[in-house]
Image: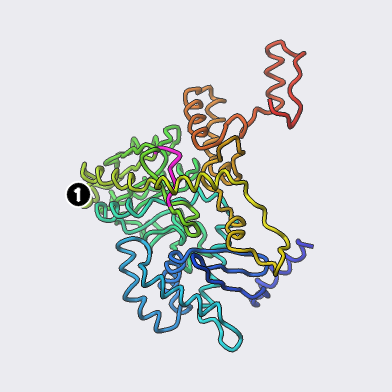
Amino acid sequence: TLAKKRAKERQQAASGKAASLPPLDIEVHRHSVDLRCGRHFVKVGHAPYAKLALLHRRAMPAEGAPEAEAEAAAVEAPAWWSTEGSPGGAEIEAEVAGARLSAQASEATPDPRAAFHQRLFALLLRYKTLRGHGFHAAIAPAVWRVLTSRLGVGFEAFASPLNCYLPTFSSGFSDVDGAFGSSGSFFRLKPAQLASGSCACNPPFVHAILDAAAARVEELLAAAAAADAPLSFAFIMPGWKETRAHASLSASPFLRRAVLVAAADHGFCDGASHQRADPLRASPYDTVVFVLQTERGSRKWPADGRFEAELRAAFAASVPLSSAAERQERKRKTPRREPKAKRAGGGKPTEAEADSDEGEGGGGGGGGGGAAPSEELLAELAPRLDAWVAAKRSKDFATADKIRDELKAAGVIADKARPVPRKAIEKRAASKGADEKRPPKRGRAE
């Protein structure tokens, strides 16, 4: 049984013996590098593959590429970290050429990148398993350039190896992310590690995480102020005024500037941009950037009117092109194909089928023409649905109506995604003296 198999795997891991796994196959296509281990399949674009290879070589030099490649990377890698947050054409070609050599590996000629590819497969499989790409969206390179040039940002909180812009970042899964340079969870970093400097904080858009992150940022700023140290945070979150995070940061004594950007005026990097041709996606919410600084931090990195103007322009440049938006809309309207258990002609999916198996249509809106929203979209918008239910229960109907309109614009009908429970319908009918009106049968639409 599956339980016995998992127990055997745990005992094998505890003993220190190497796990007996199927071989890891590498295939290089025109736009992607595919990795397969048994029935598990993941993919990554050429540019993200090159970025991850360089991050791994920097963090794990003993496991890295051959010596000649490592020497070249030591010179070339810092350039893209300080400009675009991704490798240039020469670096991409070099890394993809290395992947092609790995695809030709055999017992006679072992894969020189075997350690990296095993790490990469574990990383991609972890984030694919989590789904909900909307939780892993990131600010676009244009916005990063403003934050690094104007605020001197040098550390990223709440990133991942897949969406990080800087090589120094914290993330949620140190077991798979650590090999690519992650410092671990932002909440577990020691105060001494963030005693001074400039950071960008873009937590997942989940109420509890936003609230905890805001509290942590205020604690770090208070400690830095007491030590008279320069510390700055650019805290990016939705314009959700009902959250504790928004309320506390708006009233913070460390607040230097708050920039609210309308949903229609900006976009983000998609959480699945490492495997998609169109990296940008429209934002379903207004976004607010809180700049919080100690006194010395505000003098060192002033968040003045010029900074705000450049930040707004950078967000505007992150709106996806109309052609990209049309492609994303078509994908949202196309029903997702289920992975085929057996395929004629060898069993491996084509690249197009692999895209479908990866959930390419998820993470965006819920589709048009009456199509039901995808599971990924519902998972992404679950915090807003919860907030909508909470607002209704507290009789804050103005907030409930605003959230319902946001959800509708994103492709989700709140009343269908969070229907009123049957017991509540019966109680409501009884309170109105309408016991003779039986509630709709289970599973039937009202």
Image coloring type: rainbow
In the rendered image, is residue 411 in sight?
yes
Extreme right residue here? 1
In the visual, does 346 lie left or right of 290?
right
Residue located 52% across and 60% down the image: 173
Q: Does the magenta stretch include residue 434?
A: no
Q: Quadrant of residue 129?
A: bottom right
Counting from the top left corner in percent of width and height, residue 237 is at: 41, 43
Residue located 61% across and 38% down the image: 371
In the rendered image, is residue 222 in sight?
no
Counting from the top left corner in percent of width and height, residue 343 is at: 71, 63
Residue located 51% across and 22% down the image: 397
Extreme bottom residue here? 108
Residue located 34% across and 35% down the image: 251
What's under tag 1, amino acid-wise?
Arg
Q: Quadrant of residue 6?
A: bottom right
Q: Which of 439 and 206 is in front in this view?
A: 439
Residue position marked by numbered label 1 in the rendering? 299
